[in-house]
Amino acid sequence: MRLPVTVKATKPSFLVTWIRYSSAASSPTVSLNPSGRLQQTLAGSVEVKGISLHSGKFSTVKLLPEIAGAGRFFEFRSRFIPASIEFAQESPLCTTLLKDELKIRTVEHLLSALEAKGVDNCRIQIESESSDDREVEVPIFDGSAKEWVDAIQGVGINVAQNLVGESVEKMVAHVNKPVYVCKNDSFVAAFPALETRITCGIDFPQVPAIGCQWFSWRPIHESSFAKDIASSRTFCVYEEVERMREAGLIKGGSLDNAIVCSTEHGWMNPPLRFDDEACRHKILDLIGDLSLVSRGGNGGLPVAHIIAFKAGHALHTDLARHLTFD
């Protein structure tokens, strides 16, 4: 559901000052509270294969059910890598998990879908096309999370049970006082709220077809993510493509898995799925990155009003580190 938002894109100096003042309270930044819902997992397994955006290699991903309390984690080369912020590594244009010298790249779209669809516990087996690779990348598909949502909905979701056959209530993180991270005029902030809401702004003054956009979203029903966010595709500026390829990125990128915008000629592969598709995709990324707060099937996207402006994966994951709970 799109909510009308009119915000002037200015430097967040007043906002940052207000957050600093409000954060002086002594209460913990984040508390873990009962959600009134039971932890969930997949009703069965599903396997998909596709090309990766940055490496250009093919990888195979199998999603499997897990017991309550297991949380979400990757299995690669017979090693387990939790989808947790403590293993997140800063990397260009994507979110990467690193453990035992093994890397899982571009995890954000898959984790966004799992988080938004309520798959709290999941084993994610992933294989690269080369048996000696020490890193692997999640497939990009069409640049959105639609394929992941379709796969999850196709197999279904069940209440998860622990080792003794009991269901477990899901605990969810609540933000109790404002917290923020920023760099220059980019920021991500989380404010106490009664419900989860995400407001995102982007600003590309050099690309008129994108320009300044704002979009605000909240998960008001089970299908909200699939309807409003999941199908929004990753985007890039055409004039930056060569520079990214010279940096060893987007080797698997094409007009089939991203929407590309030229500073002079506008969108090169229309039609857009939404007028503000680029801004919505930033929310998709943010949900995936903040899902790394989850532990043991609890947490994930917090109950808060999260506001982001000109932010990327590095700021997203930096905020996630500030939202961790004991």
Image: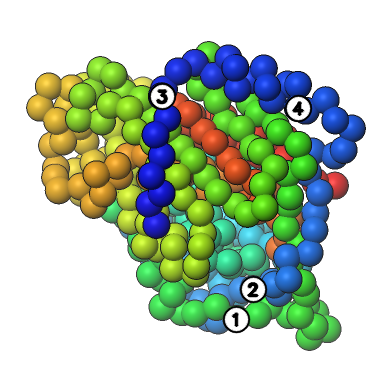
In the picture provided, is 93 more to the left or to the right than 256? Answer: right
Circle on res. 22: 4
What residue does disc 2 label? 40
Indicate left or right for 62 with 160 as reference: left
> Which of the marked residues, 1 or 3, is nearer the chain's N terminus?
3
Residue 257 drawn at (x, y percent): 26, 47
Residue at (23, 23) in percent of width and height = 207
Mark 4 belongs to which amino acid?
A: Ser
From the image, tell me which residue sits under label 1: 158
Dot 3 alpha-carbon crowd within 10 angstroms: few under 14, some 14 to 19, many 20 or more = few
Q: In front here: 139 or 11?
A: 11
- Which amino acid type corresponds to the residue marked 2 in the rendered image? Gln
Badge 2: few (under 14), some or many (20 or more) residues near its Cα, within 10 Å? many
> Front-most of 202 and 14?
14
Indicate whether 90 appears above or below 156: above
Residue tagged by mark 3? 8
